[in-house]
Amino acid sequence: MSKQPLISLSGLSVSYGTNRVLTGVDLDIFSDDFLGIIGPNGGGKTTLVKAILGTIPYSGTIIYAEPVRGIHGSIGYLPQVNGFDRNFPITIQELVLSGLQGRKGLTGSYRSEDKEKALQLLQTVGITCIAKKPVNEISGGQLQRALLCRALIPDPRLLILDEPANFVDNDFERELYDILRLLNKRMAIVMVSHDLGTISSVVKNIVCVNRTVHRHPSNEITYEQLANYNCPMQILHHDEVPHTVLGKH
């Protein structure tokens, strides 16, 4: 018996005015997936994420399985830091707790267990010491860690990350990928990145996005395969040495 996807996209297309950004997208996301979303700037990576999150109009269909549907389901989302309002009057712990807003409602209050869980998550990413600080007094890297905790506090079945390494230092970037590998044991992960050379050693499969979408069957990909997927990328590792095949461990 074949396993059922958490989310299934079929014939999905997205346009901004007369500009067609995505067309005819078919993609299944399964409970044990760790997908790396790559593609050129303007190719539709963030648009694909927004469609999955249901924040933009689209044509075609998106089917959500019960674990990610409704108030008891959950998709965790880590946006890019530069899209977050740093002047919002909220502490770091309150920011993390806001990830439970949909469950507690506007008039409810956070339980002591919720507050303790927020502190435990902050401890996991090494920033418990700034739990009471307002968001406008911390660094971009610290904010990125706090936003990760906010995405994780409702125990999502799917975690989506948009360029998570953009605002973290090299030490935490390595720690982040270790954390994600552990999280993948209990949730699906979709990670958008421009750095194919790095994420290819972290993810299980690569999804190439450039107006159309192609799911590659592994984390190893060649220049020729990228070209076949119409997905031109500068695929260099941090040492700037080109590799014919990426993703080998």
Image (tube, helix red, strand yellow):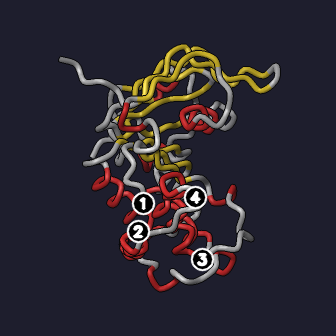
In what element is the residue under mark 1?
loop
At 43% from the left and 50% from the top, the residue drawn is: 198
Say which residue label 2 marks. Answer: 114
Q: Marks 4/1: CA distance?
A: 22 Å
Q: Residue furthest left?
A: 1
197 vs 62: above or below:
below
Say which residue label 4 marks. Answer: 166
Say which residue label 1 marks. Answer: 153
Say which residue label 3 marks. Answer: 91
Q: Amino acid at mark 2?
A: Asp
Q: Is residue 228 visible?
A: no
Q: Marks 4/3: CA distance?
A: 22 Å
User: Mark 2 against mark 1, which lies toward the viewer?
Assistant: 2
Q: Dots 2 and 1: beta carbons under 8 Å?
A: yes
In what element is the residue under mark 2?
helix
Q: Amino acid at mark 4?
A: Asn
Residue 215: image quadrant is: top left
